[in-house]
Amino acid sequence: METKLATQTADNVTVNPTAKPTTASARRPYYAVNEIENAFEVRVDLPGVNKSDIQISLENKELWIHGRRSEPQLPEGKWLHREISPADYVLRLNVNADINAEAIKAKAENGVLSVILPIAAEALPRSISVE
Amino acid sequence: MRLINYTNGMTSPWTELERMLDSNLRNFPFGVLNRGMGQGSNGLPVDIYESATERIFRVEMPGVSKEEVGVELEKDILKIQIKRSEGDGDNRTQTELSRSIRVGQDLEADSIKAKLEDGILTITVSKSDRARKQLITIE
């Protein structure tokens, strides 16, 4: 049963191979997709991005997430060492399921964004009782 | 001699094991702890910045809450440790990730301050008086 769910997730939400970042300095964040009850949950690592700097859109079955990073407020000085990339995050995912766009919910906590994409009622499996 | 080519449809027992471990790791919660070292991650990336009076360390750790982070400065080693316990009894699992940075001996351990915001831990430490004095140039 679990295997089946996993396959469905992979079929329904796939990576868009032609996706290109909108800016030269953008990079693709780590993400995971899980199927929960009548919805998909997309979790994206967006460290260093404030809630107000996250943009999410769903258009033509393409989920687009953009996280703008801002440089930290620091006293006058200099960088001695840098490993954290200052580039923005861009994630594009093709969603091959009918989503109820009105009911999409998003929450950001500790630098991880969670987007809930509810499957549209007409796309859900229904049982038909025999009269 | 017998050669087994696992790439032709056969699954190596190790691949299967890795897949199982992977699928467990991919479950919630998400974030730096579940990324693993083999997936293009370099663990905990660190930025170091210096002003005239302070040294500032920024550590990227998405998905970690402040209760899970420990920071200590002992001699010239700054250690950042993340610990997460899940489940209880026999199902208890503990995940740990840490990074130690040699920071030099010119810092005041008592002055250490840490703040976690949007998955970035910022640690600020004052430089010792001796280190500050070294900055004064003689005219």
Image (spheres, coloured by chain):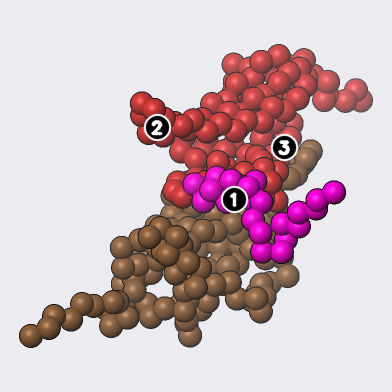
Chain colours: A brown, B red
User: Mark 3 or mark 2, which is nearer to you?
Assistant: 2
**Amino acid tagged 3:** Ile
**Amino acid tagged 2:** Asn
- Check if residue B10 falls in the magenta segment: yes
**Residue under mark 3: which chain is it in?**
B
Mark 3 lies on residue: B48
Corner quadrant of residue A30: bottom right
Q: Residues within 10 Å of mark 2 (few under 14, many from 20)?
A: few
Q: At which x and y percent is residue A12?
A: 47, 74
User: Callout 3: helix, strand or loop?
Assistant: strand
User: Callout 2: helix, strand or loop?
Assistant: helix
* Left or right: A6 as drawn, with respect to A102: right
Corner quadrant of residue A27: bottom right
**Residue under mark 1: which chain is it in?**
B
Mark 2 lies on residue: B91
Q: Earlier in the sequence, mark 3 or mark 2?
A: 3
Tell me if residue B90 comes above or below residue B45 in the rendering: above
Q: Which residues are magenta?
A: B1-24
Mark 1 lies on residue: B16
**Amino acid tagged 1:** Glu
